[in-house]
Each structure stands twice: as structure tokens, then as C-alpha cells.
Amino acid sequence: MSAISSASPSALRSPDSQRRAALEVLLSRQSVSALQEPAPDDSDLALILEAGLRAPDHGRLRPWRFVLIRGAARAAFAEVLVDALRNREPDPPEALLERQRLKLQSVPLLIAIGAKIEPDGHIPKIEQLLSVGASAMNMLNAIHALGYGGIWVTGANVYDRRVNQALGLSWPDRLAGFLFVGTPQGAPRPVRRPALSEHLSEWTGIKEVARERD
């Protein structure tokens, strides 16, 4: 058997085609809320989390904090969220509380995304939070690249200090959201993508120079 015929398909790709294939993976990513087992195994999960650690990090503060919630811990965490909801809203409907429980049990894996904030340093807090956001996006891309599905979830629970404290985060440290992770239930529905022209402009400085001359 020749060396060419025994080579893997990835080895036969040119560097340019490999780059394009990687970019196509990024361009095909979308949020997936209908999830089922299995969650990423420990090997894939390590790759996902390592991708999170590759986010830009001004000042090398490494503000990323990840908390895994899976298995039986999902039910316990659901009760944390139920208690938090009861504290925020007097006498919430029992049906609402039960939906909260069922939702948590249906998600194979939750990754709580935390931000370890350095409030007194020279790096603005917004940049620290942006780094954590970039970390979450890196993980969503890795989740998709490995064939899983994920969605970034925020809402009242993310900003509830009781929930933050239950996950080991005390102010000014805070949650930035949760990644719900699993295997997509069927093919995700096509998403209408925004037109690039609606979000792009080019600054040339010409108008500004002309204004200064006037």
C-alpha cells in the first residue's frame, strides 16, 4: 500500500484547505437548546475547557473560573435556583418551580462561567469581564467543533448573589452565565444570519481631515 493511500484524509489536505475547513466549522456554529445525552466525555471536556483558557487576557490576570455541574449535582443545583427564585419572588407558582427543576435535569452538563475580578488593579473591570466572555465563546466553538451542542444562558439566576455564592463566587467575583452542553436532539433549525453590510463600516479619516481644513 502506498504512503498516499494509507494517509488519513486530514493529512492529505493542504494547509489552506485545513484553515478553510476550520473556518467553516466556526461559521456553522449556532446555539442549541434542545439537548440530550451524552455530554462530552472527560477527554473532550478537557479540550473544551482548555479552549476556554486560550482567551485574550490583558494583564495576565487569568480571570476565568469554571464550575462543572453534572450527574446528581444537577438536582441539588436546581434546588439552589428554586430557593433563589423564592427569595426574588414572593410565592412563585409551583408549576414555575417544577419547570426549573425539570429543565436542569434535562441538561446533560452545565458549565458555570465565573469571573474572578481584580477590582484595584490597572486593568479595567470591563476588560476582565470581556476576557471571560471570550473564554465562553471559545468553549462554545470547541463544543460545536467536537460535535456537541451548547447554548450560553444568562438571566436572573446569573445575577443573583445567592446563586453566585453557592458556586463559590463572592462579589466582586461574579457569574457571566451558564453553558448548557450536550448532544443536539436532531439537526438544529437553520438560522437566518445577519447581513455583514448591516454591521460593517470602514473609517478612512477623509471626512475628518476635510472637516479640520474647513
Image (tube, rainbow, N blue to C red):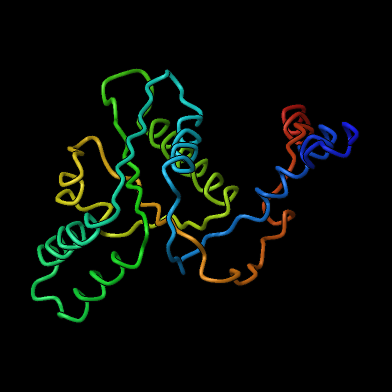
Name the residue at the front extreme: 1
Q: Residue 171: where, in percent of width, then height?
A: 19, 37
> Residue sitting at 45 percent across and 30 percent down?
53
> Residue sitting at 41 percent across and 37 percent down?
132
| Picture quadrant of residue 88 | bottom left
Total numbered labels: 0
> Residue sitting at 14 percent across and 76 percent down?
92
Q: In the rendered image of this protein, does residue 153 appear above or below residue 185?
A: above
Q: Residue 4: where, in percent of width, then height?
A: 89, 35
Left or right of 144 on screen, residue 65: left
Q: Residue 71: where, in percent of width, then height?
A: 28, 56
Q: In the rendered image of this protein, does residue 86 appear above or below residue 54?
A: below
> Of residues 197 and 87, which is closer to you in this image?
87
Q: In the rendered image of this protein, does residue 136 appear above or below residue 27?
A: above
| Picture quadrant of residue 203 | top right
> Of residues 168 and 170, which is closer to you in this image?
168
Q: Quadrant of the N terminus?
A: top right
> Residue sitting at 75 percent across and 31 percent down?
205
Left or right of 3 on screen, residue 146: left
Q: Residue 124: where, in percent of width, then height?
A: 38, 27
Q: In the rendered image of this protein, does residue 60 appear above or below residue 135?
A: above
| Picture quadrant of residue 13 | top right
Q: Quadrant of the C terminus?
A: top right
> Of residues 105 and 124, which is closer to you in this image?
105
